[in-house]
Amino acid sequence: MMRDNRAMTSTLPLITVDLAAITHNVATMRERVGRPLMAVVKANGYGHGMLPVAAAAQRGGADALGVATIEEAVALRDGGTAGRIVCWLHAPRADYAAAIAHDIEVASSAVWALAEIEAAARTGKTPAKVHLKIDTGLARSGATAEEWPDLVARAATAQRDGLIEVVGVWSHFAYADSPGHPTIAAQRGNFVDAVEVAKSAGLSGFERHLANSAATLNDPDSWFDMVRPGVAIYGLDPVGGDSRALGLRPAMRVEVPVALTKRVSAGTSVSYGHTYTTDRETTLALIPVGYADGIPRNASGVGPVGIGGVRHTISGRVCMDQFVVDVGDANVQPGDIATLWGDGRGGTPTAQDWADATDTIHYELVTRIGGRFVTTYVGGVG
């Protein structure tokens, strides 16, 4: 069997992020939709690194960058990111003054929140740029249909008073990752109705945006004035298929050097609780990462691991710092590379493979990985 002897930049576990893949993915979707695209880089760029991802997305033609919190948005701006930045998740007494000072666009789902934005704008003597959110059926943030007329009326008054500029009306899908689900058309209809209510209140010239990654890839009727892909810019299919078939390139590769191998006899029980017992003489490989590094504990006995071009499965329980893989008679040695997930080429497991094995979604896996992993970047500029 061919051994993987590629040199790693560190003896520590390694996350490699291909920034050229992110640039490619954004450019591919931007060309597909033919309208402005907001690249979502919240949660540290879905675990890929917010600042380098933001720059890569802008190289791919992203017209705006989206994050959840004001703190994330300010970190982007302080890190040298130019252009439009939008953030949307605000608790009471959020630092809207900082957002306004940094030319960051904010969102409002309620009259009381809009009042806080107005107060910050009045103090700073600069209008706030605001996206008004309508709840079209997800029942998270966003004004209900009953609250919406009051919110847009208040916004129209604040805009006339020079305190805000309404630059967007938006919402978010509940089932876009299930193409054809009846809620998709229902939410689109609710959104169109909400836009008309906003126009009737005297608002105009705002961008309408509804499409997340799944809708950007599968539902042109939801594209409106701007699309808002997140996980797809990292090369992951939100529907759970092979993203390469969509022209996307997975950007994250997760690799760990094997720490130890040992030959054991049949009947050897492995790791805590002895949930796995060998049925033959075999080789065990020790992989020095665990749930402290973001490896799901429920990957015990099911998580796929590629070593030397052969796919194996975690044997026994995932521990805090390590887990074991039964590699049979394969010639695996300490220092060989164990790939947890990558782009799928050569039989390498993917983040979707891990999601399927652990009954979760790849979003969770790529955002939680970390701990003692070292992140390195390839495909950048300069």
Image (cartoon, rainbow, N blue to C red):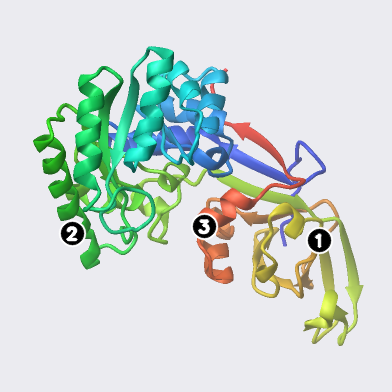
Depicted 96 relative to depicted 325: above or below: above
Which of pointers 3 and 2 lies earlier in the amino acid sequence?
2
Q: Quadrant of the N terminus?
A: bottom right
Tell me where residue 345 appears, x and y as whole percent.
53, 53
Helix, strand or loop at mark 3:
helix
Residue type, mark 1 in image: Gln
Drawn side of residue 51 relative to residue 6, left or right = left
**How far is disc 3 from disc 1 in space, using C-alphas?**
21 Å
Drawn side of residue 343 relative to residue 183, left or right = right
According to the picture, the residue beneath numbered tag 2 turns out to be: 185
According to the picture, the residue beneath numbered tag 3 turns out to be: 362
Depicted 146 relative to depicted 9: above or below: below
Which of pointers 3 and 1 lies earlier in the amino acid sequence?
1
Q: Kindly check if marks 3 and 1 are in contact, taking CB atoms under 8 A apart as contact.
A: no
Which quarter of the picture shows residue 197?
top left
For residue 322, the mark is 1
Helix, strand or loop at mark 2:
helix
For residue 276, the mark is none
Residue type, mark 3 in image: His
Q: Nearer the viewer, mark 3 or mark 2?
A: 2
Residue 180 seen in the figure: no
Quick one: label 3, few (<14), some, or many (20+) residues within 10 Å?
many
Residue sitting nearer the eye, 62 or 346: 62
Tell me where residue 175 appears, x and y as whole percent.
32, 61
Q: Quadrant of the C terminus?
A: top right
Which quarter of the picture shows residue 341?
bottom right
